[in-house]
Image: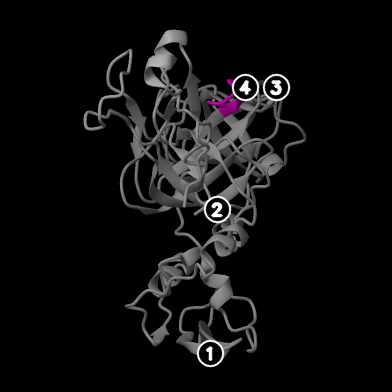
């Protein structure tokens, strides 16, 4: 329940006060905006952006784990499933997946599930309460499930110095504007290159600024493909092995990262309050949906970790209250700020000092640039 301070304005006006035989007391309702357009109290809707588990439990007095009423008692894991898919199958709050995993079994890690494994769902009594539990019958083989579905683009953020220092494509052998797989390109600025070494190709796009402070967070670079070094010289030769996006002259070559590790992040729930904002929608102009990438203005310094599930929230609008009894508002009818509402969940998969990348996994409505992030 929201708690609001009451603002009392006491006006005593000489003879008017005598006539009225009292001072006039006016209460400002939560959400009412003052004449300058701001809410009467900062952060009045802060709780709507989610709370960490301990605070939610203290306020509600009950577990936040919500079981999906359609959860199957038995399920055989299939190839192509993700850990998030399975968590959603059993829970309406899938970020609580590790909490329902039965630790008293052979596989104690709730993230080590393979295709072919059989999951058994039921309830056990703990402290006189029935709590949901998942047990696994290890029948599977092969690689464990990824937490999120593989995707083809891996955006990165670099500062200007890193972009200037990076190796770059000087030209293609055939001087093509749009380069294709198998094409030979000439590269400068390589340091200690080795024949056969592979590099990811990135294209610098635009700067990213923190929408709250205006501070430059870095420059977005978009993935184009990767190349193999074939000949080492002052101007090295390389072959484009993969082209996922447009590759052009001036694009930078960066060491390939182990993106597979980002797909196997553990599902976690933040234990502290998180508040932030979407800086950018990767490869989207204004709106985004499931499996699109978000750039967030919070990173390691704010305690963000890979695997954190975050809520995405859209601010409520401002409306005119035409129905409140007239109270002599000097500037017309009062303006009221509506509370924010949750539109999606997102899983953080890559974290830097001051920003992070997250993948939208559960979108109920469109996600827009500037939307807020909070606890799920």
User: Disc 1 designates what residue?
Assistant: 124
Does label 4 or label 1 sit earlier along the sequence? Answer: 1
**The label number, if any, that marks residue 368 in the structure image:** none
Q: How crowded is mark 4: few (under 14 residues within 10 Å), some or many (20 or more)?
A: few
Does label 1 or label 3 sit earlier along the sequence? Answer: 1
Question: Which element carries disc 2, helix, strand or loop?
Answer: loop
**Looking at this view, is 258 or 318 the one in front?**
318
Q: Is residue 374 above or below residue 203?
A: below
Distance Cα–Cα, label 4 vs label 3: 17 Å
User: Disc 2 designates what residue?
Assistant: 51
Does label 2 or label 1 sit earlier along the sequence? Answer: 2
User: Disc 3 designates what residue?
Assistant: 161
Instruction: Say which of marks 3 and 2 sits in front.
Output: 2
**The label number, if any, that marks residue 215 in the structure image:** 4
Q: In which quarter of the image is residue 321?
A: top left
**Looking at this view, is 134 or 285 the one in front?**
134
Residue 174 in the image: state x and y as whole percent. Answer: 45, 25
Instruction: Say which of marks 4 and 2 sits in front.
Output: 2
């Amino acid at each position: 329940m929201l708690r609001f301070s009451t603002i009392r304005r006491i006006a005593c006006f000489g003879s008017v006060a005598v006539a009225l035989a009292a001072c006039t007391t006016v209460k400002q309702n939560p959400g009412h905006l003052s004449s300058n357009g701001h809410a009467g109290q900062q952060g009045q809707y802060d709780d709507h952006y989610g709370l960490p588990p301990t605070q939610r439990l203290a306020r509600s007095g009950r577990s936040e784990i919500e079981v999906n009423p359609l959860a199957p008692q038995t399920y055989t894991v299939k190839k192509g499933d993700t850990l998030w898919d399975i968590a959603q199958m059993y829970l309406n709050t899938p970020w609580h997946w590790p909490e329902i995993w039965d630790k008293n079994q052979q596989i104690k890690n709730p993230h080590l599930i393979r295709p072919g494994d059989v999951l058994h769902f039921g309830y056990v009594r703990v402290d006189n309460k029935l709590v949901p539990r998942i047990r696994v019958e290890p029948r599977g083989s092969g690689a464990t499930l990824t937490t999120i579905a593989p995707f083809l683009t891996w955006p990165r953020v670099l500062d200007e110095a890193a972009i200037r220092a990076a190796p770059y494509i000087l030209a293609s052998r055939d001087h093509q504007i749009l380069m294709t797989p198998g094409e030979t390109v000439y590269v400068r600025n390589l340091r200690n290159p080795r024949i056969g070494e592979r590099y990811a190709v990135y294209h610098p796009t635009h700067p990213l600024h923190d929408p709250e402070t205006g501070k430059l967070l870095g420059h977005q670079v978009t993935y184009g493909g990767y190349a193999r070094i074939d000949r080492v010289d002052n101007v090295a030769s390389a072959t484009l092995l993969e082209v996922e996006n447009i590759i052009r002259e001036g694009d930078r070559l960066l060491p390939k990262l182990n993106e597979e590790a980002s797909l196997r992040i553990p599902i976690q729930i933040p234990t502290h309050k998180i508040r932030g904002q979407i800086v950018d929608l990767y490869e989207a102009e204004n709106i985004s949906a499931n499996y699109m990438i978000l750039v967030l203005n919070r990173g390691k310094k704010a305690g963000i970790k890979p695997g954190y599930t975050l809520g995405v929230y859209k601010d409520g609008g401002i409306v005119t209250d035409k129905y409140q009894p007239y109270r002599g508002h000097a500037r017309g009818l009062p303006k009221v700020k509506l509370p924010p509402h949750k539109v999606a969940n997102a899983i953080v998969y890559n974290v830097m000092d001051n920003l992070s990348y997250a993948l939208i996994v559960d979108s109920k409505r469109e996600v827009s640039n500037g939307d807020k992030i909070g606890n799920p």
